[in-house]
Image: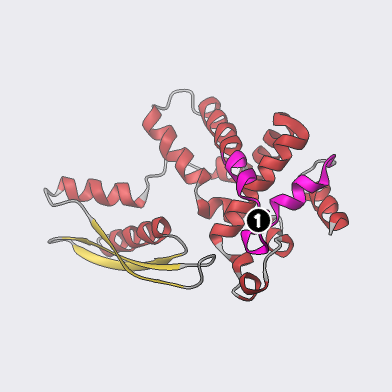
Amino acid sequence: MSAAVAAFVRDKLGHEPKDIALFELALMHSSLGDQSYERLEFLGDRVLGLVIANALYARYPKEPEGNLSKRYNGLVDRATCAENGREIGLPALIRLGKQAREDGANQSENVVGDVIEALIGALYLDGGMEAAERFILELWGPDLSSQGRAPQHPKSALQELAAARNLKAPVYEVVSRTGAHHAPQFTVRVSVPRLGDATADGTSKQEAETAAAEALLSQLK
């Protein structure tokens, strides 16, 4: 495993690992036992946030804080993290317990998103901020470049639409929660009186709420 992880770090993260154990830990899911990527994910999440915030601040010198926040949220959300994790082939290297593996947790948006952040944490500890920043800006580069106008989060857009029509704020309701603890599936319904309702699924409550808001907005176009 160490040789495969070391090759992955060199090829995909662009870094020669000094402490390979850090990167192996970043790939360990909690279903394996007490040791897992969770502490490294906590650190990597903050490193990712700082690098992206700094990049946006420099790229859009005339934009107000509100627009920068919209851009930031779209770049560090779980979907974008998971998409970039898959881009570098991360699911194949995630280490899981038997049940989690059978449940396909290595394909879960939550797990892949968490692990890419854990790897950023490991890279920061092993190579410093320069190594972490270089990796993030390279992998997130297309996402940064593809943003035109500051994106508006679907939940914010739906709330603003309801307010503009003098309607009550959207109400989100969890219809069901299925799946294993490490690979949940949420179904959420959003409704706005006199406007309509929509239902959508997601691997987290937040993801399902966002998808439901997006679905309702699409009905109203």
Q: How is the image coloured?
A: secondary structure
Q: Main secondary structure of the magenta part?
A: helix
Residue name at image x 61 percent, y 57 percent: 112
Q: Measuring from the top left, give residue 196's x and y in whole percent.
A: 19, 64
The residue pinned by badge 1 equals: 34
Badge 1 crowding class, 10 Å Cα cut-off, few under 14, some 14 to 19, many 20 or more, is few
The region drawn magenta spans 17-45
Q: Measuring from the top left, give residue 39's x and y in whole percent.
A: 62, 45
Residue name at image x 65 percent, y 71 percent: 101
Residue name at image x 56 percent, y 35 percent: 52
Residue 127 vertical placement versus 20 (above, below): above
Q: Which residue is farthest bottom?
A: 102
Q: Would you say residue 149 is visible in this rendering?
A: no
Q: Quadrant of residue 18?
A: top right
In the image, what residue type sits under mark 1? Asp
Q: Measuring from the top left, give residue 126's x and y in whole percent.
A: 77, 36
Q: Which residue is farthest front?
A: 34
Q: SS for tag 1?
A: loop
Q: Is residue 36 magenta?
A: yes
Q: Is residue 168 magenta?
A: no
Quarter of the rendering occupied by the N terminus? bottom right
Quarter of the rendering occupied by the C terminus? bottom left
Q: Which residue is farthest right?
A: 3
Q: Measuring from the top left, give residue 213's x and y in whole percent.
A: 32, 58
